[in-house]
Image: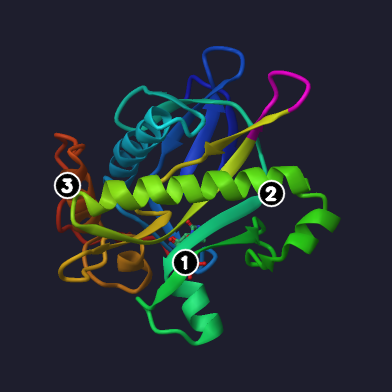
Amino acid sequence: MNRRKKIYEGKAKIIFDGPDPGSLVQYFKDDATAFNSEKHSIIEGKGVLNNMISEHVMNGLSNVGIPNHFIKRINMREQLVQSCEIIPLEVVVRNFAAGSVANRLDLSEGDPFARPIMECYLKSDKLGDPLLTDEHIAVLELATAYEMEEIHYIAFRVNDFLSGLMYAVGITLIDFKIEIGRVYKSEFPTLVVADEISPDTCRLWDSNSGRKLDKDVFRHDLGSLIDAYSEVAKRLGVLPNANLKRSGKPKLVH
Ligand code: UDP
């Protein structure tokens, strides 16, 4: 991976220049972070599982006509993606209460919402990703009103697709986060789903037992993250044939 020019390194991925103009290589690391990076571990094999799961989800989105940046998987840790301008929003869709919304509104984890809701947070580690209203998004010129309409439409389409994909394998989609990018091919940019969709960016509960199969396992020390992510990959039929440490203790970084 050193032969390519590094464009950006994030908490869980590194972005390299791609082989063709307009392409990038997304490398999935084993780093797990939570609580704005206060908690950080290396969990061997996590990047491989997220690469496989995200490939499966993005291919599924393409199959139902939801535009996204995924081109193809290159190897166990890398995928080729279309370069785009990331809109600095974390777009969250929630079907059931959990995480920050449960804390903010004093709801019980797992309480269903009457209908799915979308929220946007500012992508800013410095500010701790604050919740934004549409008015904030407009005056800060983060996205136009037209783009917000489009983002809303895309986010709910992803929710319908992902809820069904997970339902079919006995998993309930509680919530998820997506990122949206602008692709400039003509005068007006088109919007695509970018980044990744994996157990790092979703809340996934076993539909029967309620067992958590997502990053909350790491956030709240609920057991082996690799066991949980492997279970999701296995049910989706994309568990790699690698020698992943199934129950190994994560290596604590700080
Ligand atoms: N999420 C994410 N990245 C973030 C923040 C949230 O992928 O930086 C995902 C998270 O895993 C969950 C959903 O977005 O599936 C909603 O997260 P929430 O707002 O509840 O924040 P949390 O309490 O998880 O930080």
Going 27% across and 51% down the picture, which residue do you hit? 166
Q: Does residue 97 show up magenta in the picture?
A: no
The residue positioned 70% from the left and 24% from the top of the image is 184
Q: Secondary structure at mark 2?
A: helix
Position of 180 relative to 40 (above/below): above
Q: How far apart, in angstroms, are the residues tagged by discs 3 and 2?
A: 34 Å
Say left or right for 130 vs 27. right
Q: Position of residue 144 (x, y in %)?
A: 78, 46
The quadrant holding residue 21 is: top right
Horizontal and vertical percent position of residue 35: 50, 69
Q: Nearer the viewer, residue 254 or 107?
A: 107
Q: Quadrant of the C terminus?
A: bottom left
> What colouring style does the render use?
rainbow
Classify mark 3: helix, strand or loop: helix
* Front of the two marks 2 and 1: 1
Marking on residue 148 = 2
C-alpha separation, residue under disc 3 versus residue under disc 1: 27 Å
Q: Residue at x 73, y 18 (%)?
A: 186
Residue shown at 64%/43% (left/top)? 150
**The stretch drawn in magenta includes residue 186:** yes
Instruction: Name the disc covering residue 115, or none.
Output: 1
For label 3, count other residues whose C-alpha is less than 10 Å away and answer few (under 14), some (14-19) or many (20+): some
Residue 65 makes an appearance in the image: yes
Which three-letter amino acid code belongs to the residue tagged 3?
A: Arg
Q: State whether residue 109 is above or below residue 215.
A: below
Mark pair 2, 1: CA separation: 19 Å
Q: Which residue has dot 3 on it?
A: 235
User: Looking at the rendering, which quadrant does residue 241 occupy?
Assistant: top left
